[in-house]
Image (cartoon, rainbow, N blue to C red):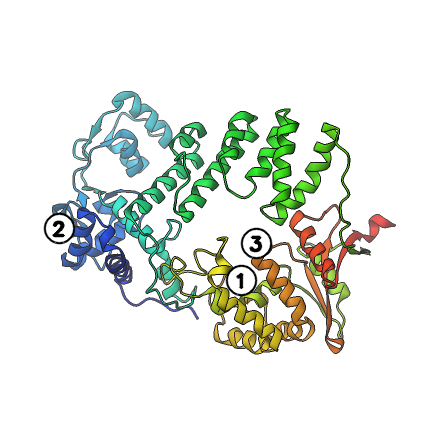
Amino acid sequence: MVRVLENRFYYLDNFLAVVASVRARYRHLLDGEEQAFVDGFEALPLASRALLVRMVMRKGELFRSSRLRYDEIGCARSAAAPLIAAGWLDGEPAIDIAQLCGLLTKTELAEAFPLLPRSARKAGQLDILRDEYGDAVRTLAGWRIDDQLLRLSIAPLCDRLRLMFFGNLHQDWSEFVLSELGIFRYEQVDLSLAQGFSSRQDIDDYLHLHACRQRFHDGEAPQAVAACLPAMPYPNDWLEQRRSKLLFQIAQYYERSAELVAALCLYADCAWPGARLRAIRVLERCGQPDAAFGLAQQAEQQPESEAEKQQLLRVMPRLRRQLGHGKTLQAAAAPIVRHDLALQRAAPGVSVEALLASHLSRIDAPAVYVENTLINSLFGLLFWDAVFAPLPGAFFHPFQSGPADLHSADFRLRRASQFDAGFAQLDSGGYQQAIWRNFHAKAGIQSPFVFWEAIDEQLLAMALDCLPPLHLRKCFERILQDIKTNRSGLPDLIQFWPAEKRYQMIEVKGPGDRLQDNQIRWLHYFAEHGMPVAVCYVQWAEQCA
């Protein structure tokens, strides 16, 4: 049940919690200005602290005092005075005409500049004022506006504190509120090892990469952004992943724009998954099949993932033909059972998966639409302790739905003992008790694997009765091979025969739909390990008549 926050200064308490956490964990990484802030903030009057936090949590850095109306704070001008004295607010910032237009309403602009046509839109008003005032900058008083303007001078400092607390910049202050209201619940992890940044340079590098990524997404010339990225990989793996991802995105932009030489240069310097395969394809487009073939041979010897291996099976025959090489024999994949059905067209709003589940279901053999939810949830419930192990660099704060290193190559290795214990329960038969225990004890707590809204006791009971532990082990091992990729692509439906303690996975394809690569990989994996699976192709009955 969602509850109402009674504490009027809840946001201030949340901000103080961040300050206290950063002061305790990272004091040695703070410069003089930052230390003065975290040490001096609590000494300010309550209203001043509350006003500063309200401004920090709002968008932008410029605020009119008349718009800062909060009952618990009172007069914004009075509350701002100590903040101005501390240098945390600028009480008389100079702004240009575009900034002024952003702060005033259309009516206020017309009153301040009587010569403006009242019928003009605000954008038109700005064009007229730009022609008259150009690049002039003035205080609010200089623009003849009777109000106080405040600039949040410490916005970058507060962003740095937020980064140090959360370990990222995509989470913000709303996380506290969502948790306190009961909208999200998180696993309580021991944060004594929550040391995310080992040096101030790591923080500076993160902020630099974030700024570069923002510039690229805002449409700045990609060559300018790429020039600002370090030429050499970061020694910090976490930062290097961010650098590689941005390089990959810029290279993709070049490739789509047919700037193939530039794309190839970036792909060659990029360790992001998929970069090598993109480089092979770009070499093909550049008319360099020999170079493409050589790189593809390297990839064949040490494929980075199942996805790359799958793509190479398509690329290599084409390159061999171009270069006049003979064909190579490929092992035949395990056959996939196929069913073709003609059904009455689904009603509006009813998916083909739900339609087929309804068609197949019987009292003694229910079919359920689960897609990626069931197997992932079983994994998450069995390995809950492994996923939420309080390891260094895994958890930074109380609002994480999963560990920060979830997609790292050494994720399983760092938790080897916990995962080994979970797999041992599959062998001993204790896995069902462990899954049921976590299903009840952790109900509703955020997890990167458990889909609480999709599983209930009835589904869980049928799954544990009908899915053999060996089949669960195979599924879980494959998820751990590549968590980011293999959490998706699982078949849409599962049909149970509880009396016989058996099941079948069913991938559903409606008219005109086709199998995706990650689905194909899962289907072949099921078939290879003798796990019952089929693909059902549905056509509409009226089209087959």
- Give the amino acid at mark 3: Asp
- Give SS at disc 1: loop
In the picture, measured across the screen, residue 120 lies left or right of residue 445, that is left
Q: Which mark is residue 482?
A: 3
Residue 119 x/y as whole percent: 36, 29
Of circles 3 and 2, which is in front?
3
The residue to which callout 2 is attached is 82
Q: Decide which of tag 3 and tag 2 comes sooner along the chain.
A: 2
Residue 194 placement: quadrant? bottom left
In this rendering, is residue 339 above or below 309? below
- Give the amino acid at mark 1: Phe
Mark 3, other Cα within 10 Å: few <14 / some 14–19 / many ≥20: some
Question: Does residue 436 appear anywhere in the picture?
Answer: yes
Of circles 1 and 3, which is in front?
3
The residue to which callout 1 is attached is 449
Judge by depth and name the residue closer to the eye, 239 or 448.
239
Q: Decide which of tag 2 and tag 1 comes sooner along the chain.
A: 2
- Give SS at disc 3: loop
Tell me the residue at 39%/42% (across/down).
Answer: 234
Mark 3 to mark 2 CA distance (whole Å): 53 Å
Marks 2,1: beta carbons within 8 A: no
